[in-house]
Amino acid sequence: MPGCAATYDIGDARTSCDACGALLDVAYDWSSLPVPDSLKFFEAKWSRRHEPLCRSGVWRFRELLPFAPPDKVVTIGEGQTLLHSSDGVGRYVGLQPGNLYLQYEGMNPSGSFKDNGMTAAFTHAHTIGARRAACASTGNTSASLALYCGVSKLMQAIIFIGSGRISYGKLSQALDYGALTIQIAGDFDDAMQRVQQVSKQQGIYLVNSVNPFRLEGQKSIMYRVLEGLAWQVPDWIVVPGGNLGNSSAFGKAFHELHQLGLIERMPRLAVINAAGADTLYELYERRGLRWNSGQPDSNIVADYYAELDTAGRRASTVASAIEINRPVNLWKCLRALECCDGVVREATDEQILDAKAQVGANGIGCEPASAASVAGAKMLREEGVIAPRERVVCVLTGHQLKDPTATVAYHTHDQAEFNRVLGSRGVSRAAFANRAIQVENNLDEIIRAIELNS
Ligand code: F0G
């Protein structure tokens, strides 16, 4: 925390400060580092894409995350992701043509944005000689860690997941890539608490976003957004909020670029919770919790968590990736919200799934949690917080194939299946369902069905 300002060596594996207990932040002495004088500097790297450190969409920007010796970097070509303009989704959100962009992080090697941060944390782990790495996960962090371990063979992956809490797409990745998988009878918040205890006790390197190097890698998502806009700053960045690593990283990225004189203004940040896992929304928008120049009121948080415990309330949303009630990066996210004049909203599962269907219908596709960004942008547009002429970037954090159960249930004609998967979450209708047509195995019937429906 700013008031503490203790510093630790880069060779330490610690994630929090002994003195004040807050999570650590990577701080650079920019005055002694070779910082480019314009973001255009990075364009030259495209012509050197045969070099792994130029091919990676993270390490291409390594002058902006200069913590790792280049010969220790572990890269698998992460971050080859692009900013897509989508007028179809823009219409749904309520923006003028040309103003809605989707930063599609599903194209990463493990299918989610996590690879941006994993390459950085994994590199740090490798630099300090770690042999085992652990994380708790709602599925994507574990898939990413398992993948880096599987490819590099440098470490063993140990993953903690809440039993029955992760989608099959993600679970299958961890199993296939060979991670030691510990299913805990509990949810993500339980698994997160346990993995911190176990990794501390057993000296296992922890790669959750409590790890400050994860966030360094995730800054690069914003560098690529700027690159996609020819280095112009958009008006809004809209991102789903779970453990709040992304939002924290994005705020840090823009703050540093601004400090270094590489951008002239800051974008605004909107963080979107699922309504069934809405701690940030509750604390920030309802109870007035603020970063307050580094002096947030921790009583507000303690009171709220005590209320959750008393009521036995657990996070619950179809967007399982963000089914989190105790976000570990809460303070850093508050800092990002302060420096980016941020807002927080919550979207219901129905709003999330409708937005997801629109993203899919416009040809990109994403997992439920990712679509919270689009649902949130639409809400902020309707409220008039976002204007139709503003340039909005929604971050799509994970690939559509991560969670086929939710997608198929949304589009199904089988009411029992709909009720089982979605009705139980309070979803009453699927406004954009694309239902499969049931026909007999009969040529005339098949042709009639096609003619009737096309
Ligand atoms: N979207 C997806 C697809 C995610 O997997 C996550 C987080 C988030 C959004 C939220 O991002 O934590 O930076 O606010 N997934 C973590 C995991 C928790 O274990 O895979 P955040």
Image: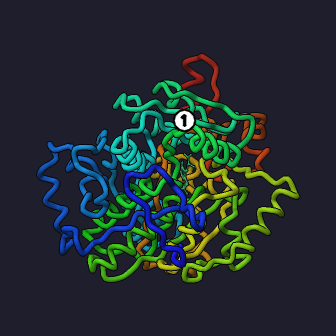
Q: Is residue 300 above or below residue 278?
A: below
Residue 189, can we see it?
Answer: yes
- Numbered disc 1: secondary structure: helix
The percent position of residue 91, horizontal first and vertical second, equals: 49, 66
Q: Quadrant of residue 410?
A: top right
Q: Quadrant of residue 42?
A: bottom left
Which residue is pictured at 54% across the width and 46% down the height?
Answer: 367
In-image side of 225 versus 203 (left or right)? left
Q: Quadrant of the N terminus?
A: bottom right
The percent position of residue 61, horizontal first and vertical second, equals: 26, 59
Q: Is residue 126 above or below residue 54?
A: above
**Mark 1 sits near ligand 1, with its Cβ under 8 Å away:** yes
Which residue is pictured at 18% across the width and 74% down the height?
Answer: 37
In-image side of 379 versus 216 (left or right)? right
Residue 138, can we see it?
Answer: no
Which residue is pictured at 77% across the width and 45% down the height?
Answer: 423
Front one among 435 and 49: 49
Q: Most extreme residue toward the right, as rendered? A: 310
Tell me the colour scheme of the image.
rainbow
The percent position of residue 145, horizontal first and vertical second, equals: 46, 38
Q: Residues within 10 Å of mark 1 (few under 14, many from 20)?
A: many
The tally of labels here is 1
Tag 1: amino acid = Lys
Q: Quadrant of residue 280?
A: bottom right
Front one among 212 and 238: 212
Which residue is pictured at 53% across the width and 53% down the height?
Answer: 370
Q: Which residue is mark 1?
A: 170
The percent position of residue 187, horizontal first and vertical second, equals: 71, 43
